[in-house]
Amino acid sequence: MRLFQLIKQRWLSQNTLPQIADEIADRCVEAVWQRVEYQIGTLAPAEARGYIRARGVAVVQPELVVLSARHEVREHLRPQLHALALEAIIQRVQSRISARTARRPMRRAA
């Protein structure tokens, strides 16, 4: 019986990681955006991803600790949860960047 409970708990925790990562991203995306919005427009897409990831680590870590404790995420799954949350934040910030640049009218040289 104990083995069944362990398997069930492991399966449930792995299947809920994307939802928890989205919750972390929802909570952190504004703070990350405030950290990167002024610099991000001058970077290439690959550089922007790295910049967002680097600036987002400090914001994601405290939320990761709180939500992983609340959802009882096992310690060995926290790095995977961290990576999923950062990836979700990167995608959201990049979609903001693309929406922001799509609204800007293109300037033409005379």
Image (cartoon, rainbow, N blue to C red):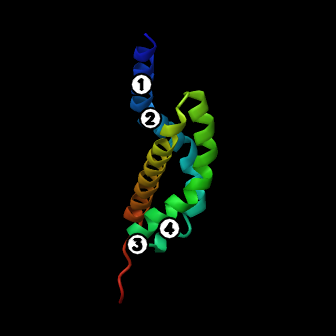
Tag 4, which secondary structure?
helix
| Contact check, label 4 and label 1, Cβ < 8 Å | no
Amino acid, disc 3? Ala
Query: In which quadrant of the rendered view does residue 7 lie?
Result: top left
- Is the N terminus in the top left, top right, bottom left or bottom right quadrant? top left
Query: Which comes sooner in the sequence, label 4 or label 2?
Result: 2
Which sits in the foreground, 49 or 75? 75
* Spatial CA span between label 2 and label 3: 30 Å
Please tell me which of labels 2 and 3 falls first in the chain.
2
Residue 43: percent from the left, percent from the top? 45, 73
Which tag, 1 or 2, sits closer to the chain's start?
1
* First reached walking from the N terminus: tag 4 or tag 1: 1
Q: Distance between the residues labelled 4 and 2?
A: 28 Å
> How far apart are labels 4 and 1 at the CA level?
37 Å
Give x and y (percent) for residue 42. Answer: 47, 74
Q: Residue 54 placed where, x, y %?
A: 54, 61
Specify the amino acid type for callout 1: Leu
Label 4 Cα crowd, 10 Å radius (few <14 / some 14-19 / many 20+): some
- Locate the C terminus by quadrant: bottom left
Query: Which of pointers 1 and 3 lies earlier in the amino acid sequence?
Result: 1
Q: Name the residue under label 1.
A: 12
For image coordinates 60% across by 28% down, the residue present is: 70
The answer for how far apart the CA atoms under marks 1 and 2 are is 9 Å
Q: Compared to 98, does 82 lie above or below?
A: above
What element does badge 3 sit on? Answer: loop
User: What residue is rendered at 35% in x and 82% in y?
Assistant: 108
Residue hosting label 4: 40
Mark 2 highlights which residue?
Answer: 17
Looking at the rendered structure, which numbered label has been put on residue 44?
3
Vertical order, 82 against 38 (above or below) = above
Frontmost of labels 4 and 1 is: 1
